[in-house]
Image (cartoon, grey):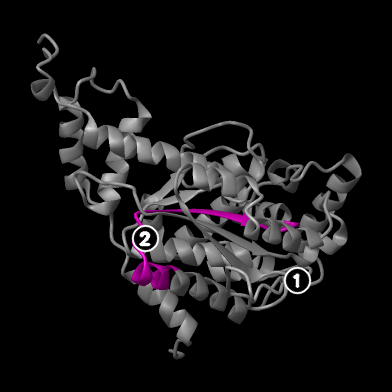
Amino acid sequence: MAKLSKDQSLIATNCAAISHIDTAIQDKVKKQQAKLTKPEGSLGRLEDLAVHIAGIKQKKDPTLIHNLVVVVAADHGVAQKGVSAYPTEVTKQMMENFINEGAAINVLGKSIGARLVLIDAGINNGNFEDAPVVSLSIGKGTDDFTRGPAMTRKNAEKAVASGITFFNNELQNNQIDIVACGEMGIGNTTSAAAITAAITGKKTQIVTGRGTGIDDFTYKKKLSAIERALKINIFDPEDAISLLSALGGYEIAVMAGIYIGAARNRVPIIIDGVISSVAALIAVILEPKISEYLISSHLSPEPAHQIILDHMNLIPLLDLDLRLGEATGAALGLSLCISACKLLNEMATFTEAQVAEKIT
């Protein structure tokens, strides 16, 4: 057997360290929910959400105070084919907007008191040395996957490993109660649709949406690019690294690594839209138990999103027609997670409130 590289070993070690969530704790939380001053089940999925988070964190009274939002940005070579309504330089420009706190995620993150971390996973012409940006850049964007693989297998492994290392380092330096992930990258819905088609076997037209709001002419170019990529690239749908190498983006690979690191450390993961959900599926292919740590924040209008969520048996918390990305839906989902835990921990019981219980 060939010796594993450093990155391969890091991925394998962290995946192997992931355990199932604690169902015994969940049973105790369900019993506590039944004692609170409300008809049983009347808070609906908020009750389920608190139970889920308790099982992940192995705590009967989970609190979400130290909350992390991560936005990972990278460029895609396929954007050169004119598959987006926006030019490729928008990736860099939006990163600068995040830095200057002018984007939607800055507003939403502040509204819930979350700490925002920005990651450059491979932005073309990106130079953020003097800015609060974590550099995990391996290359200045992926190659055009209509002409060959988006990245080498080695670089795909390196990108996943860098996401794991990033999260583990963050956890050493800061408390993290929950992590929400989003992305930025012109052309990345094209990559996400291609990966979705490769994994599910569904036709290109079924998994491909309008992304940034493209017209019919651009949509045809997007379909053509995906079909070409699926035809000329060699990949194994059950090999996550193979999929990333052939069709992926560096931000997708890094987010998959962050999910691995979070699950390994029993930190709940809130996924955003279609791109971060594809990254979650990549992580689940690498280690199926990661699916137990995932919370889907919302449903995007992108058709691939519902398909990917169904594939992972995830039900989104919200359906607001959000399609911005950059962790905006994840931030809203995080606010619900905070509320769910507060309700569990701060509501009075029937005994404490001296309220009569249900007649039996």
- Write the residue at 19% across / 38% down: 29
Q: Find residue 254 and report its horizontal and vertical position in percent.
A: 55, 67
Residue most extreme to the top: 359
Kindly identify the amino acid type of the residue bearing the numbered disc 1. Answer: Asn
Task: Give the magenta part as a residue range.
Answer: 167-187
**Within 10 Å of the Cα at label 2, are there few (<14), some (14-19), or many (20+) other Cα atoms?**
many
> Quick check: can you spot residue 131?
yes
Q: Quadrant of the N terminus?
A: bottom left
* Near-viewer residue (21 or 71): 71
Q: Find residue 199 and report its horizontal and vertical position in percent.
A: 59, 55
> Quick check: can you spot residue 313?
no
Q: Find residue 180 and report its horizontal and vertical position in percent.
A: 47, 52
* Near-viewer residue (35 or 339): 339
Q: Can you tell which mark lies on residue 263? A: 2
Instruction: Name the residue that disc number 1 marks.
Output: 124
Q: How many marks?
A: 2
User: Could you tell which of marks 2 and 1 lies nearer the N-terminus?
Assistant: 1
Left or right: 85 in relation to 70: right
Q: Separation of disc 2 and disc 1 at Cα?
A: 30 Å
Q: Secondary structure at mark 2?
A: helix
The image quadrant of residue 259 is bottom left
Left or right: 235 in relation to 8: right
Query: In the rendered structure, does residue 111 fall within the stretch colored magenta?
Result: no
